[in-house]
Amino acid sequence: MAVTLVLILALAGCGGSSGGGSSAPATTTPPASTPSGGGGGSGKTVDVSLADFSITLAGGNSLTPGTYTFHVTNDGATDHNLTINGPGVSDQATPTFAGGESKDLTVTLQNGTYEFFCSVPGHKEAGMDVNVTVGSG
């Protein structure tokens, strides 16, 4: 009888789980697709490449005001990060990460000029420093 009770509870749990399982992937999927579906008004994704010793934004160094997810890839051999300073943004940064890895950084940018740089000592001075104009600057 105890075995029957356990089976009934397990089946009831599976039924509840499968409904919850359907919800969980649906909840997980939208955040993963939100950055790439940024045209829908929830933000824009910009690919950023870090190298030894440069920073390149796909599409250039001019952006419109709004919320951005910067998909940052370290294409260099040494560890790098992306740090952003400008109007309303102070030292927003990815963690420092190894070559071949990628990290995301979401920031809301307003009109103005922003400095995108690597804060690893010596990297900014070596050329990892780019000014990005947002809106009318």
Image (tube, rainbow, N blue to C red):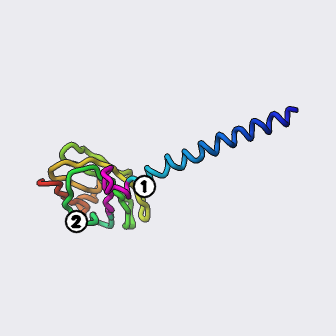
Q: Residue at x 15, y 50 (%)?
A: 112
Q: Mark 2 or 1 closer to N-term?
A: 1
Count neighbours of disc 1 (C-alpha within 10 A) and say few if under 14, some if 14 to 19, many if 20 or more: few
Q: Which residue does the numbered mark 1 point to in the structure image?
A: 33
Q: Quadrant of residue 40?
A: bottom left
Mark closer to the observer (2, 1):
1
Q: Are marks 2 and 1 in contact (CB under 8 Å)?
A: no
Asked whether residue 54 is in view, the answer is: no
Residue most toward the left? 136
In the image, the segment drawn in magenta is 35-48
Residue at the spot x=28%, y=59% of the render? 123
- The location of residue 79, given as percent across then percent down, is 38, 59
The quadrant of the picture occupied by the N terminus is top right
Secondary structure beneath dot 1 equals helix
Circle 2 — which element?
Answer: loop
Query: Which mark, residue 60?
Result: 2
